């Protein structure tokens, strides 16, 4: 048995201090203390740094420079809970600084912070760890880190913490995280809706507000809206709206409800419980602009669905929106106008707005706020689409003038929609005339120059709507609108190109505009478009045809064909077949060319004598008004020459008039004058004679034969086939050109004409006296006329008229002989 041994206690070593209280007023010293192995020193140092950092951002920057963040990072995982808590408190307070947050991201502290959110940790650690995460979650990269490191689940769990600061920091962090779609999708599975709804009962407004903001973000997803409805979330939101003491939460609550209204099922649920009526009533009595604006935005979102529009209309949402148009706040007016735009897809709503809302919208067109103007005119564009009654309401509200003025707006949307409304109004003749009288075409010239495809498209569409009027086309021409219109044919936008082609087709309805469009290059561009299977459309083909039909000189030169519907008028000229890629010159340009040995230009100008004299006198009067003196003939002298010319032979009179015009032109400054086409009184006499002798004939066949003999007689008579090469028509034409000192030859001057002279004269006279015929250009100076005639003695069933037969009219060898199209004789006439 052993004995107990009594041990003596040794005294402490001489080099060990008893515990001391260390104090320091120098931040650098305290930071150095963070490297101490003593828990109590570390805790005291952290407490000191916390107080120092709390005093301002400048102190946080000082600590950052002293390396405090790196040392603290090592301490947030310290085994001593007091040290760990104190270090995290400093982290939480310092993380509000931008530079500190940057360093924290570099140190990748999020994982360590998330680990501190465990249920067993101290509530203070929860508070400052969530605070630090909330500060850092404003950066996208940190959001991703927190999500990927599993931070959402503990944050959602802490929404049920007994500490309000933990709740506040956690919900703020979640709000920032769900801005990212990954986190927004993940919160469904983590059942975030119930704890968020519970936070709405908090006594702290900031927590309620953050909860609503988070709900507003996540309720943009349909799945969240369904869960919200299942958890009586809609009732909670409506109760907030009904409670006056929660007025500071009404805007956010309404934003969440606005998202819920997008879902048909949810909207039906709100309607069935009477919530929708309450909501609209609440908006109607509210005087808070943000609430009114958000309500209108919510209606806009909901109205994108046709079923929703029907439900909203049943609750008379139209009255609510019309009342919002009267609110003295531009933001509310914009939102209300946008909601009306969306709602008027519903026909019942469209009618309701037409009866009451249009006058208010028209008034908004005069607003100084461009955004208000744009929203109002967009609503009017939707209201007047396919609605003549609403278009009438716009006109009755005196909306035409402000609409035309809106075409000068600084916002593309306003310009495009103003053009649309005016186009909708133009469907009714009285309004179209009214709009035209206010200079619509001049106002459209600038939008046609826009770089915005929507503006280009709508402006071109408006041109097509108003271009059916001759005065409107003249206005557009004078305003310089044809140039930008033609340029838009190059557009790569299909809608723009289609509408521009339509506008060109309409504008090409008169010769002057068609000629100008061709001069600007429309013809070449349209030909190029029509060669492309991907770019051409029915309007591009129709535009090309219309352009040529109203510019017959160019059509005949390019196509070598004029149909019976193409009526040749004065100022037509035949300059021969033009080669691809060669510019087609105008008469004025051709008149300035030197006399050449090339093919003469045959010109048609059968203006009555009185018209020519009136033009000549008017021209001289205009020149005298500009103080331009005529060197070789006075105004009085020229008139006397013309008067004395009466009673002379036609050719002599024509020569005198040409001489007078030539003398007038010689004295002009060419920069201030226009070329005057020479009159052709001989052609005028041909037409008069044909009207008197050929027109009375009983059948078309007789008229055709007689006209063929008439034309041949005027141009050298019948020619024997064998002697065709002896018919020296070229020399004759050259003599005329030399006499006139010009390449342009009036057809009446031609006394020895070949195929193409005779065919042209036949077509000109036939068009004037009402005989339908075409003009076809062949090769080697050949041209001929084709007519359709019904057989005088039809065979077969008695009384049955056979279809008309097509004939070529012989004007050279046996004038008046009709050659059946497709026969060997026809081939010989064309080619031999």
Image: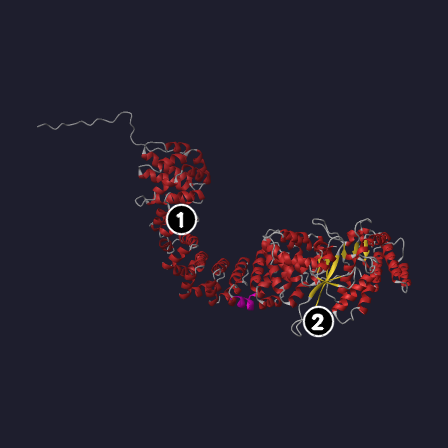
**Residue that numbered label 1 is attached to:** 174
**Residue 38 vs residue 699: left or right?**
left
Q: Quick one: label 1 or label 2, which is nearer the N terminus?
A: 1
**Residue 119 vs residue 647: left or right?**
left
Q: Nearer the viewer, residue 388 or 57?
A: 388
Q: Residue at x 77, y 51 (%)?
A: 589
Colour mapping = secondary structure
**Residue that numbered label 2 is attached to:** 793
Q: Tell me whether the residue at label 1 lies in contact with that at label 2, contact meaning CB atoms closer than 8 angstroms.
A: no
**Residue 585 vs residue 195: left or right?**
right
Assign a secondary structure to mark 2.
loop
Q: Nearer the viewer, residue 610 or 456?
A: 610
**Residue 473 vs residue 239: left or right?**
right
Q: In which quadrant is the N terminus drawn?
A: top left
Q: Nearer the viewer, residue 693 or 635?
A: 693
Disc 1 from disc 2: Cα separation: 97 Å
User: Is 51 placed above or below 758 here?
Assistant: above
Q: Residue 396's spot in the image, x, y percent? A: 62, 68
Queried whether the magenta region covers residue 439, the answer comes back as no
Task: Count residues near mark 2 (Cα–Cα under 10 Å), then give few for <14, some for 14-19, many for 20+.
Answer: few
Residue range of the region highlighted in magenta in the rendering: 349-357
Q: Residue at x 66, y 52 (%)?
A: 525
- Depth check, mark 1 against mark 2: the one in front is 2
Q: Residue 428's spot in the image, x, y percent? A: 63, 67
Q: Residue 490's spot in the image, x, y percent? A: 63, 51
Location of residue 536 (image quadrant): bottom right
Queried whether the magenta region covers residue 351, the answer comes back as yes
Q: Is residue 676 visible?
A: no
Find residue 555 and name its label: none
Task: Count residues near mark 1 (Cα–Cα under 10 Å), then give few for <14, some for 14-19, many for 20+.
Answer: many
Q: Residue 666's spot in the image, x, y percent? A: 86, 52
């Amino acid at each position: 048995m052993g004995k107990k041994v009594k041990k003596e206690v040794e005294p402490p070593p001489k080099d060990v201090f008893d515990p001391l209280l260390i104090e320091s007023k120098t931040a650098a010293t305290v930071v150095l203390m963070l490297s101490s192995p003593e828990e109590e020193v570390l805790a005291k140092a952290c407490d000191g740094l916390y107080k120092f950092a709390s005093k301002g951002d400048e102190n946080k920057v000082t600590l950052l420079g002293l390396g405090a963040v790196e040392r603290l990072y090592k301490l947030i995982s310290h085994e001593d809970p007091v040290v760990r808590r104190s270090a995290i408190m400093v982290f939480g307070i310092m993380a509000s600084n931008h530079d500190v947050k940057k360093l924290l991201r570099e140190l990748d502290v999020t994982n360590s912070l998330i680990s501190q959110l465990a249920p067993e940790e101290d509530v203070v650690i929860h508070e400052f760890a969530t605070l630090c995460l909330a500060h850092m979650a404003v950066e996208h990269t940190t959001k991703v880190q927190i999500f990927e490191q599993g931070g959402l689940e503990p944050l959602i769990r802490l929404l049920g913490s007994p500490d309000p600061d933990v709740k506040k920091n956690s919900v703020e962090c979640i709000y920032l995280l769900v801005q990212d779609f990954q986190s927004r999708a993940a919160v469904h599975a983590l059942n975030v809706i119930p704890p968020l709804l519970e936070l709405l009962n908090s006594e702290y407004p900031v927590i309620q507000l953050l909860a609503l903001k988070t709900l507003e973000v996540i309720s943009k997803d349909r799945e969240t809206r369904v869960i919200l409805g299942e958890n009586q979330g809609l009732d909670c939101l409506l109760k907030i709206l009904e409670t006056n003491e929660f007025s500071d939460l009404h805007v956010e609550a309404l934003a969440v409800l606005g998202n819920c209204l997008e879902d048909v099922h949810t909207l039906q649920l709100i309607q069935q419980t009477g919530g929708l009526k309450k909501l609209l009533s609440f908006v109607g009595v509210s005087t808070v602009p943000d609430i009114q604006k958000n309500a209108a935005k919510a209606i806009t979102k909901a109205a994108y669905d046709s079923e929703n529009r029907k439900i909203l209309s049943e609750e008379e949402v139209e009255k609510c929106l019309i009342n919002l148009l009267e609110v003295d706040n531009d933001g509310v007016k914009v939102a209300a106008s946008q909601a009306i735009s969306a709602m008027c897809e519903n026909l019942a709503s469209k009618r309701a707005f037409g009866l009451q809302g249009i006058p208010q919208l028209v008034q908004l067109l005069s607003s100084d706020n461009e955004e208000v103007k744009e929203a109002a005119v967009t609503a009017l564009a939707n209201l007047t689409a396919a609605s003549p009654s609403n278009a009438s309401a716009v006109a009755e509200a005196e909306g035409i003038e402000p609409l035309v003025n809106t075409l000068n707006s600084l916002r593309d949307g306003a310009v495009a929609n103003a053009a649309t409304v005016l186009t909708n109004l133009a469907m009714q003749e009285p309004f179209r005339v009214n709009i035209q009288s206010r200079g619509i075409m001049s106002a459209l010239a600038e939008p046609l120059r826009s770089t915005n495809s929507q503006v280009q498209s709508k402006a071109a569409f408006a041109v097509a709507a108003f271009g059916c009027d001759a005065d409107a086309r003249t206005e557009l021409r004078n305003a310089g609108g044809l140039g930008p219109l033609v340029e838009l044919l190059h557009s790569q936008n299909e809608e723009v190109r289609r509408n521009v082609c339509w506008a060109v087709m309409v504008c090409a309805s008169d010769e002057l505009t068609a000629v100008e469009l061709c001069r600007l290059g429309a013809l070449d561009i349209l030909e190029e478009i029509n060669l492309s299977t991907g770019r051409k459309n029915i309007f591009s083909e129709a535009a090309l045809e219309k352009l040529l039909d109203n510019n017959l000189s160019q059509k005949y030169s390019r196509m070598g064909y004029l149909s019976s519907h193409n009526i040749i008028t004065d100022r037509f000229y035949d300059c021969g077949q033009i080669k691809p890629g060669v510019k087609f010159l105008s008469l004025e340009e051709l008149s300035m060319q030197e006399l050449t040995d090339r093919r003469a230009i045959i010109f048609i100008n059968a203006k009555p004598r009185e018209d020519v004299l009136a033009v000549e006198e008017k021209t001289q009067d205009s020149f005298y008004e500009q103080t331009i003196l005529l060197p070789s003939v006075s105004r009085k002298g020229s008139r006397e020459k013309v008067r004395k010319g009466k009673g002379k032979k036609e050719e002599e009179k024509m020569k005198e008039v040409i001489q007078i015009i030539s003398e007038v032109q010689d004295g002009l400054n060419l920069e201030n004058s226009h070329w005057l086409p020479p009159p052709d009184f001989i052609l005028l006499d041909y037409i008069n004679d044909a009207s008197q002798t050929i027109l009375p004939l009983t059948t078309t066949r007789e008229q055709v034969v007689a006209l063929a003999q008439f034309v041949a007689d005027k141009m050298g008579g019948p020619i024997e086939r064998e002697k065709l090469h002896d018919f020296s028509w070229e020399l004759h034409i050259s003599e005329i050109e030399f006499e006139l000192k010009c390449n342009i030859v009036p057809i009446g001057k031609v006394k020895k004409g070949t195929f193409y002279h005779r065919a042209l004269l036949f077509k000109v006279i036939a068009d004037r006296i009402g005989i339908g015929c075409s003009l076809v250009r062949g090769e080697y100076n050949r041209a001929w006329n084709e007519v359709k005639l019904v057989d005088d003695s039809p065979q077969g069933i008695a009384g049955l008229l056979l279809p008309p037969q097509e004939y070529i009219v012989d004007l050279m060898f046996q004038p008046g002989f009709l050659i059946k199209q497709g026969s060997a004789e026809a081939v010989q006439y064309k080619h031999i």
